[in-house]
Amino acid sequence: MKIHHRWMRGIFFAGAIALLLSCGGGGGGSSGSLGTLGSSSSSVTGSDGAAGGGSGSSGSTGSTANTGSTDGTGTGTAGGTDGSGSTGGTDGTATAGNGSGDGGGVGSGGTGVSTADATGVGSVGGLGSIILNGVRYKTYPEAADGIDPANFSLEDTTELQIGMSVRIAGKIDSEFTAATAEQVVSAAELRGAVSAIDVAGGSFVVMGTAVTVDNATVWSGANRLDQVTAGSVVQVWGLPSAPGSLRATRVELKPASAEPLVTGTVQNLDPIGQRFTLGQLTVQYSGAVFSGGIDQATLAEGAIVRVRGSVAPMAGVFSATKVQGWYAVPRQDAAAVQLAGVITNYAGLNAFKVLGTAIDASNAQVTGGPSTSIGNGVKVELDGFMSNGVLVVKKLRIRNIPGTGGPVAFTLIGAIGNYQSPSSFVVKGQQVNAGGGATVFENGTAADLANGRRVTVVGDTVVDGVLIAQRVSFTQP
């Protein structure tokens, strides 16, 4: 009997050891186990006994913990609308993936804190905080929960508006759905007198630069190209494409400043004569101040630069007072990058350029149109990671195909202000008209519009500076 009891205790002890191993205490060769459910936070034990997901984020009752992997890292779950979920890091840490509490998620992202250093370059697709290339970057206007507010650097405008080009540095999750901005930089690309207007072709020329517009171009002071006259001074925000050309994302007539400005790709660089060409314009930079990460020694053929002057060009020669490096795209391996721009140098999905950056989208998820439509002149949004100087794309969204067009959506997220009527109120500084018969209301009606009510407004057209709402969603009582 004693031997029998000793044998039974041995079986019980072996079972306990096996149970412990199944919870993550095993050796490095086994797979990670599923974490337990937690009412507020949870952690995961990786297969090598290390903390696979680190300390879990604050979540709601019943949120699921992360799954440990073979190297002890946690595989993150998506942030929910109740603040649940977290994103597992590669070093055994987890970063919170907070859901949006105000219905402000763009795509599947919500608001979230992120895991990777990121750079986004494109045009502002919405406000509240900033929506760039389909992702909502929280800016935290006031320090909260230990997060510093984003640092803004704006030129040629006093406030960020829809359609303005921008560069954002911050953090983003690995799926490019949620981000936090740390630095926001914006400046116009072109300012000068209009010439050679081609209404049918959707283009005009300013100081030797050919400007094209599409159905996503936002107008201020006019509503379309046929309302622009030769000699008018315009200020343009846009995305440089082929040398000497710019795709306009916002065009403003009668800008506050008339000082000339041009952006483009450096060609025919002559360091001895201290000049180069931008499109049809010759830039003389002998008296210029350099900034934006470049100087005379590092100025190079093919670089994209923004050039400012005090007087308009004479006989095709522009005397520069400032030469700025245009929004720099990081080159270091594994850097997370979002780019919006026009495709150039297309030789296949694995070899083309956007904003002068080499792109490989051969394994990308393509949305917004068939992959066969991708080629030179197509406007795209790209999400990916740098590798040996090439942006390896994870997601590619087609935004405009020449002659066909593309999807347009501008989004505002925030509280209503200056309410006069359903056809006249403001969200995030943008005038809104939701009084049309085609406007769809969610979680309420037009009668619920009032100062202080939080809404998400989506529209695809700006007329006389007013966003025409297609959908208004109420996000809190």
Image (cartoon, rainbow, N blue to C red):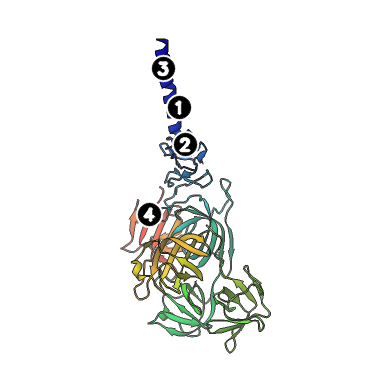
Tell me the amino acid under the disc marked 2: Ser
Is the Cβ of the residue at disc 2 closer than 8 Å to that at disc 1? no
Mark 1: few/some/many CA within 10 Å (<14, 14-19, 20+): few
Question: Which residue is labeled 2 in the image?
Answer: 40
Real-space Cα distance between discs 1 and 3? Answer: 16 Å
Mark 4 vs mark 2: in front: 2
Q: Earlier in the sequence, mark 4 or mark 2?
A: 2
Q: Earlier in the sequence, mark 4 or mark 3?
A: 3
Could you say where residue 291 lies in the image, as x and y percent from the top left? 64, 70
Tell me the amino acid under the disc marked 4: Ser
Q: Earlier in the sequence, mark 2 or mark 1?
A: 1
**Farthest-out residue, right:** 287
User: Considering depth in this image, is 150 or 464 the residue closer to the camera?
Assistant: 150
User: Considering depth in this image, is 17 or 237 the residue closer to the camera?
Assistant: 17
Is the Cβ of the residue at disc 1 closer than 8 Å to that at disc 3? no
Q: Secondary structure at mark 4?
A: strand
Q: Total number of numbered labels?
A: 4
Question: Which residue is labeled 1 in the image?
Answer: 17
Q: Which residue is located at x 35 percent, y 54 percent?
A: 447
Q: Earlier in the sequence, mark 1 or mark 3?
A: 3
Is the Cβ of the residue at disc 4 closer than 8 Å to that at disc 2? no
Tell me the amino acid under the disc marked 1: Ile
Could you say where residue 328 lies in the image, as x and y percent from the top left? 56, 66
Real-space Cα distance between discs 4 and 3? Answer: 67 Å
Question: Which residue is labeled 4 in the image?
Answer: 473
Mark 4 vs mark 1: in front: 1
Tag shown at residue 7 = 3
Mark 4: few/some/many CA within 10 Å (<14, 14-19, 20+): some
